[in-house]
């Protein structure tokens, strides 16, 4: 299995689609201009404009998309695009292609993360052997795991953002009845740990306190939180970190993720002013009777942009280092 170069790498989210070009296995990534997903009728239309920007005709494409992948196709969870890899390859005359779930790709990126691309949450801990997790708060909530099998990397995709998420303690119990559940009829983790989730949680916090919910989007919520660190917006954003810690601790316990937990995505790096690492770690580790094990699991945050494009470039350069069912999933 090989990916002929040049290769285009694509990260397709519910809000933005990002692109990069790799001319040869050992050449640097050439970033392209991001596109708004909603501004293009289809993935093929967005790709066509990206190809024009690169000025060369790629021979292969590796893309990750925010939705459940079935073989060579995906329907985005938070956008209108449906993608069929074989049709994309035929329309754009590609020699080869591969479609990954976005957090499957994030997991496969973990082995190539450079030290300067991440920062620890809490005291730095030496990662142990074992399952590694990646969790991302963005347009939605993504999560995946990575295991190593005989020196090769295997990603376990998931839709763990859609599991039920219950309140813990009196503060959360007072807030939960006010959370808007009109989308799915229940509170899932993504209901509050996502872009729109920030707004839902803040409106619920205000209602629980007897205040009128403000008309804010997530950008204005963060701006007002930064402007007044003792205000209600800042309190909501500090609560987001506590809920993220609790969710991550549960997921780590589910899979005994002794290899560590990495947070990615577009939202959490913008909220570091509201992060108290000691409180975060206390909530993450509060998993009796396994507190001692949890205290040994490192947590970190990706602070660099678009690292998943580097991860997919590594797959293109060394596909045999990864356990992927290419027979089922490759486009040609």
Image: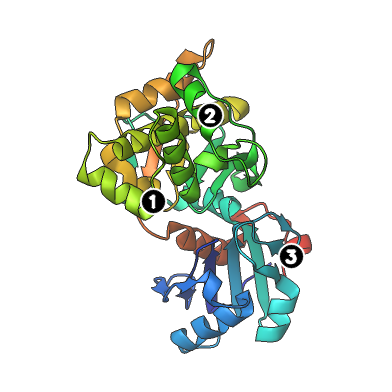
Residue 140 visible from this viewpoint: yes
Circle 3 is placed at which residue position?
A: 72
Q: Position of residue 194 (x, y in %)?
A: 49, 46
Mark 3 element type: loop
Residue 298, quarter of picture: top left
Q: Is 246 placed left or right of 275 in the picture?
A: right
Left or right of 273? Residue 53 is: right
**Contact (Cβ within 8 Å) of mark 3 with mark 2:** no
In the figure, 91 relative to 35: above or below?
below
Q: Secondary structure at mark 2?
A: helix
Q: Is residue 193 above or below residue 247?
A: below
Residue 250, percent from left and from top:
55, 27
- Report how far apart the C-alphas of labels 2 and 1 lie in the structure: 19 Å
Sequence-wise, the earlier of marks 2 and 1 is 2
Q: Residue at x 38, y 25 (%)?
A: 281
Image-based side of 320 in relation to 195, left or right: right
> How far is disc 3 from disc 2 in space, using C-alphas?
39 Å
Q: From the image, tell me which residue sits under label 2.
A: 176
Q: Earlier in the sequence, mark 1 or mark 3?
A: 3
**Residue highlighted by disc 1:** 216
- Please say if 107 is above or below 89: above
Q: Residue at x 44, y 33 (%)?
A: 207
**Which residue appears farthest toward the right when viewing the image?**
328
């Amino acid at each position: 299995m090989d990916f002929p170069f040049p290769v285009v790498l694509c990260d397709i989210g519910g809000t933005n689609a990002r692109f990069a070009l790799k001319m040869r296995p050992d050449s640097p990534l050439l970033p392209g201009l991001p596109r708004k997903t909603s501004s293009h009728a289809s993935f093929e239309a967005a790709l066509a404009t990206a190809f024009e920007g690169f000025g060369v005709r790629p021979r292969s494409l590796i893309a990750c998309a925010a939705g459940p992948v079935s073989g060579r196709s995906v329907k985005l969870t938070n956008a209108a695009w449906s993608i069929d890899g074989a049709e994309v390859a035929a329309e754009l005359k590609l020699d080869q292609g591969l479609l990954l779930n976005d957090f499957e790709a994030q997991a496969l990126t973990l082995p190539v993360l450079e030290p300067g691309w991440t920062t620890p949450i809490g005291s730095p801990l030496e990662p142990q052997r074992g399952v590694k997790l990646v969790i991302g708060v963005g347009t939605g909530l993504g999560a995946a795991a990575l295991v190593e099998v005989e020196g090769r990397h295997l990603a376990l995709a998931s839709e763990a953002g859609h599991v039920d998420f219950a309140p813990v303690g009196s503060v959360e119990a007072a807030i939960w009845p006010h959370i808007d559940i009109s989308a799915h009829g229940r509170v899932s983790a993504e209901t509050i740990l996502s872009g729109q989730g920030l707004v839902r949680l803040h409106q619920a916090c205000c209602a629980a306190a007897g205040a009128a919910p403000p008309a804010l989007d997530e950008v204005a919520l963060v701006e007002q939180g930064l402007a007044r660190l003792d205000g209600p917006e800042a309190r909501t954003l500090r609560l987001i970190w506590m809920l993220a810690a609790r969710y991550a601790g549960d997921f780590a316990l589910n899979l005994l993720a002794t290899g560590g937990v990495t947070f990615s995505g577009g939202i959490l790096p913008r909220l570091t002013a509201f992060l108290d690492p000691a409180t975060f770690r206390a909530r993450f580790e509060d998993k009796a009777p396994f507190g001692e094990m949890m205290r040994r699991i490192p947590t970190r945050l990706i602070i660099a942009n678009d690292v998943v494009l580097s991860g997919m470039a590594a797959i293109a350069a060394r596909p045999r280092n990864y356990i992927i069912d290419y027979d089922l999933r490759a486009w040609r």
